[in-house]
Amino acid sequence: MHGYWACRRRTWIAVIDFQHRQGSHCESTAAASLLAHHGWPLSEAMCFGLASGLSFSYLPFVKIYGMPLVAYRALPGRIIARLRRRLKLPLRMQQFTDSAAGQVRLDALLAQGQPVGLQACIYWLPYIPENLRFHFNAHNLIIYGQQGDSYAVSDSVLEGTHRIARDDLQRARFVRGKLAPKGRLFYFSEDVAAQDIRGQIGPAIRQVAREMLQPALPWIGVKGIRFLGKQLGQLDAGIPTRETTRLLLHIVRMQEVIGTGGAGFRFLYAAFLQESAQFLQSEPLAHKAIELTAIGDAWRQFAVELARMAKGRAPLSPRLLQAAADGLAARETEFFRSLSALRTQLPGG
Amino acid sequence: MRTTDLETHDSTLLSGQRRVVYALDDAGQYQGVHSAGWEPEEQAGLDEVDWFDHLRTECRARIAQGLDSPLRYHMYRLRLDESLLAEAVGLWSWRVKRHLGPKGFAALSPALRERYARVLGMSAQDLDRCD
């Protein structure tokens, strides 16, 4: 409370000296830039990898905008939560039932000089380019300053920083619906010293390999990729209907448009493997990064095919799409098997 | 992907912004690099925008014929669908579905109109207008 009243007494609040970073994925970059602010500069790829962010899920019964859920990564919120647990970070998270309380808490933290991470609905953020504004409730951003009714925002999707009005921010933080943010905020309660992460890389890889190969549910991991292929194989050949076009482009959107760093996070994860290989001086691990890059390129080719068929530049061939998905599933199966075997030779693995 | 594979056309989707993707540079090292967009990415992103524009235009025509309600128009204008709108206002979808028809919309109570207006970020009077 002290900080809040301090901020009410003074009419201005200094903007915190905060280094904005742009990244490909909002959640891992938000974690990385807060962590850097508190004394431990880790790359986005390292945060993503240590949080075991890579995954695949195809859940046809969960609909977003009438389209099945296709995700190439762990559930929203998991990345920060897993990173906190793995690195034992002093990261505090809070949600609010009352929107006024959520605002008071944010102001109080800012008054203490804390940059604060927030979960918000991307549609209601006016500074986001119009074409990227859809109702996705689990976008992450960082507020690092306040001046009256205006907040300074560092949003990792964008090249520079922006300002947002209090009412707009409140609306984005307290929307209702699936993955509702409930004003969720996160911040570091103290500064962190850089740790030795060599022992954490093995277990983080293990978690991803296990999720991809032996998922708890059949719609996740390589089985999920096969399942997606099977459903694509059941489409009607020929000229796609408007609904089919939308489905095909929806998959491309989930893979390439929504901040995945390309190929549905495969390149981001390959960057993590490469950085890890340098930490551990492991030649075989460095080789794995290159292998995953080739798989990522195949995912990109898959996106090209989907878009061509959706746009009518190539005849819609369900058989080809299914074969492509099966091929990707087979390659990822082999990749994660060998990665998992390699992991046992790493420290902590 | 290699940094040399990046396309350099200006993206309509990103309105001139550039985003970060990961690619291998000439030395075989991963770098986060700026991308101005990529054709499939561009097509997929803009298709979703077009989808809502199309729904909106279609809806406006139906309103003119008295077949649809302005509430539905505003729903599409804000890129919402029935289930998202229902979750956002906190009503059962079957009720929302009814309110989206011209009859159900006309019968809305002032309190419910207020609730819809708040969720849609507009005033209750403006609910009847669609432009």
Image (tube, coloured by chain):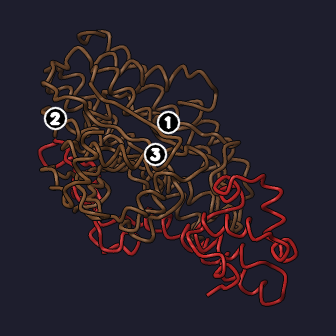
- Chain to which mark 3 belongs: A
Tell me the tag on residue A183: 3
Q: Judge whether A156 appears above or below A316 on screen.
A: above
Callouts 3 and 2 in the same chain: yes
Gap between marks 2 and 1 measured at Cα: 26 Å
Q: Position of residue A112 (x, y in %)?
A: 20, 42
The chain coloured brown in the image: A
SS state under label 2: loop
- Chain to which mark 1 belongs: A
Residue at 71% x, 56% y is B86
- Chain to which mark 2 belongs: A
From the image, which quarter does the C terminus of chain A lie in? top left
Q: Which of the 4 image quarters holds residue B37?
A: bottom left
From the image, which quarter does the N terminus of chain A lie in? top left
Residue under label 2: A38
Image position of A104 (left or right of A199): right
Q: Residues within 10 Å of mark 1 (few under 14, many from 20)?
A: some
Q: Residues within 10 Å of mark 3 (few under 14, many from 20)?
A: many
